[in-house]
Image (cartoon, helix red, strand yellow):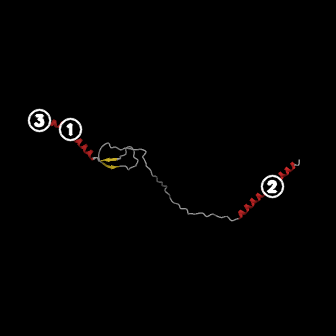
Amino acid sequence: MTILPLSRRRVAVAALAVIVLAGLGTFGAIRVDASSSAAPTIVPEVDVATVVQKTITDWQSYSGRLEAVEKVDVRPQVSGTIVSVNFKDGALVKNGDTLFVIDPRPYAAEVDRAEAQLAAAQAAPATRKATGSARNA
């Protein structure tokens, strides 16, 4: 039975030692906070710039090759000399837009020649009748 009270005594001494150490630790922490708040705070140096308001154009350049999504081959239906081009490279065009103007003078001359041949062919029977009646008379 003497061992049991001895072990209670050891437990009581150990508990008392823990309480004393905890109290000293708390007192030391409070004392450190009090001493650090009393010391002057050091302000760090920072760089300062004035604010300037201006418009900024967002620009990025890339190197590479570009290829069109759609490709169109323009082929003439008739031959001739191009007088004017009515679009710029890369411009959007719609179905039916005039892209090129070809010199109309050779085609107008061909129309005049064909009309002259038609007039001559239509006048030929009347001329034959007139010539034939004059021979018969």
Residue at mark 1 to residue at mark 2: CA–CA distance: 139 Å
Q: Which mark is residue 18?
A: none
Residue at mark 2 to residue at mark 3: CA–CA distance: 161 Å
> Measuring 87% from the left and 48% from the top, which residue is drawn there?
3
Q: Secondary structure at mark 2?
A: helix
* Location of residue 133 (image quadrant): top left
> Measuring 16% from the left and 38% from the top, which residue is drawn there?
127
Q: Which mark is residue 121?
A: 1
**On-image quarter of the C terminus:** top left
Q: Tell me residue 113's x, y (percent).
A: 23, 43
Q: Which mark is residue 135?
A: 3
N-terminal-most mark, 1 or 2: 2
Kindly identify the amino acid type of the residue bearing the numbered disc 3: Arg
Look at the numbered discs 2 and 3 and tell me whether their residues touch, using CB distance below 8 Å: no
Q: Tell me residue 53's x, y (percent).
A: 53, 60
Kindly identify the amino acid type of the residue bearing the numbered disc 2: Ala
Q: Secondary structure at mark 3?
A: helix
Q: Nearer the viewer, residue 91 or 97?
A: 91
Return the residue found at the far right. Answer: 1
Residue at mark 3 to residue at mark 1: CA–CA distance: 21 Å
The answer to whether residue 21 is left or right of residue 125 is right
How crowded pointer 1 is (Cα within 10 Å; few <14, some 14-19, many 20+) is rated as few
The answer to whether residue 17 is left or right of residue 80 is right
User: Which circle, 3 or 1, is nearer the viewer?
Assistant: 1
Q: Secondary structure at mark 1?
A: helix
N-terminal-most mark, 2 or 3: 2
Q: Which mark is residue 17?
A: 2
User: Which circle, 2 or 3, is nearer the viewer?
Assistant: 2
Q: Tell me residue 51's x, y (percent).
A: 55, 62
